[in-house]
Image (tube, rainbow, N blue to C red):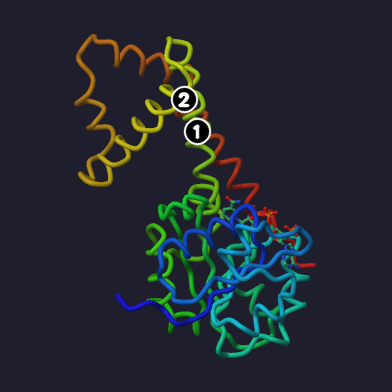
Amino acid sequence: MPKLNQRIAILGSRGIGLPIAEGITNSEITENKVIITRKNSSFSEKEKEQFICYHDNNLAVKESDIIIVAVQPKQFNDLIKEIRNELTDKHILISIVSGVNISDIESLVGKNIAVIRTMPNTAIKVGQSMTCLAFNKLGENFKSLVQTIFNSVGQTLLIEEAQFPEATVLCGSGPAFVFEFLNGYILACIQHGFNKEQAMQIASQVTKGAAEIIQKTKNDPALEIKDVTTPGGCTIYALVEMQHAGLNSALLKGIEIGIEKAKKLYSKT
Ligand SMILES: NC(=O)c1ccc[n+]([C@@H]2O[C@H](COP(=O)([O-])OP(=O)(O)OC[C@H]3O[C@@H](n4cnc5c(N)ncnc54)[C@H](OP(=O)(O)O)[C@@H]3O)[C@@H](O)[C@H]2O)c1
């Protein structure tokens, strides 16, 4: 596939902005270096080699076609007010900021431009993000371009904007839940005699292998569980004990509370 000639700028480049820049650069989808900005913190030598690094958002906007906004919800209003004079109808504005609706963005920008709301996760840095997307009317014209970008760094799903609080937790926060699971698995491996390196290998490969079975076969995990459990065997004993201890219940409750919090992350004023 020919490389994109549009320039991508990522405004805000720490927790998620930097992984996005790394993922897009590694995917080689664009022929141009990605621009990244920060408010105060400095850029490392490695970052300066890999990206174009600015502290000036307006310069980044001027030199780019696709702008990905990756600041915290409380930083969002100030950033848009700072760049809105520089935004033109050639720009595609992609927000990954939790809690900020497309209509909030449109009214802050005050111009008719393409706006796309997304929810990726940090697995984007290894090309494995699960990214949800929603478009405003003008943004619809760039659906295939935006999907091409995010498909180059994982998988995408078009969703109703109303589902973003759920996507924020299930996609955006998702890696943290899996890391927590992995952490517990590693502890169990170490408790049972494996060293840390072996424990990390076992835990990560088991998780990856199980996920790949579901992705490739599209089988319901409940059916796969039945395939690996011998009646009266050790697996079913372990699973039943985990359910008595509330494994699924803790996951469901935690996600529910996370979604309630996601609905209150942004204040318009
Ligand atoms: N972290 C995740 O896994 C994840 C996943 C999905 C979505 N999100 C969403 O992504 C957004 C960013 O989260 P984060 O975890 O990346 O936050 P973060 O680690 O705090 O990073 C925010 C970045 O924005 C920069 N910044 C703030 N104001 C700026 C301004 N006016 N101009 C230029 N840069 C500015 C900061 O600069 P300095 O470095 O100078 O402070 C920093 O680099 C949030 O809305 C979050 O909900 C995060």
Q: Residue at x 19, y 26 (%)?
A: 227
**Residue under the point 43% across and 10% down:** 192
Kindly indicate the quadrant of the structure image that contains residue 16.
bottom right
* Residue 36 pos. (x, y %): 63, 68
Say which quadrant the N terminus sits in.
Answer: bottom left
- Of the 4 image quadrants, the one containing the C terminus is bottom right
Secondary structure at numbered mark 1:
helix
Q: Position of residue 268 (x, y in %)?
A: 75, 67
Q: How many marks on residues?
A: 2
Residue 247: mark in rendering: 2
The yes-or-no answer for disc 2 within 8 Å of ligand 1 is no
Q: Residue at left 60%, top 68%? A: 10
**Dot 2 lies on which element?**
helix
Q: Is residue 39 left or right of residue 252?
A: right
Q: Residues within 10 Å of mark 2 (few under 14, many from 20)?
A: few
* Amino acid at the residue labelled 2: Leu
Circles 2 and 1 in contact, beta carbons < 8 Å: yes
Considering only vertical position in the picture, is 185 above or below 88?
above
In this rendering, position of residue 82 left or right of residue 117: right
Question: In the drawing, what numbered circle is on residue 251?
Answer: 1
Q: Amino acid at mark 1?
A: Leu
Instruction: Decide which of 148, 103 is in the foreground and name it.
Output: 148
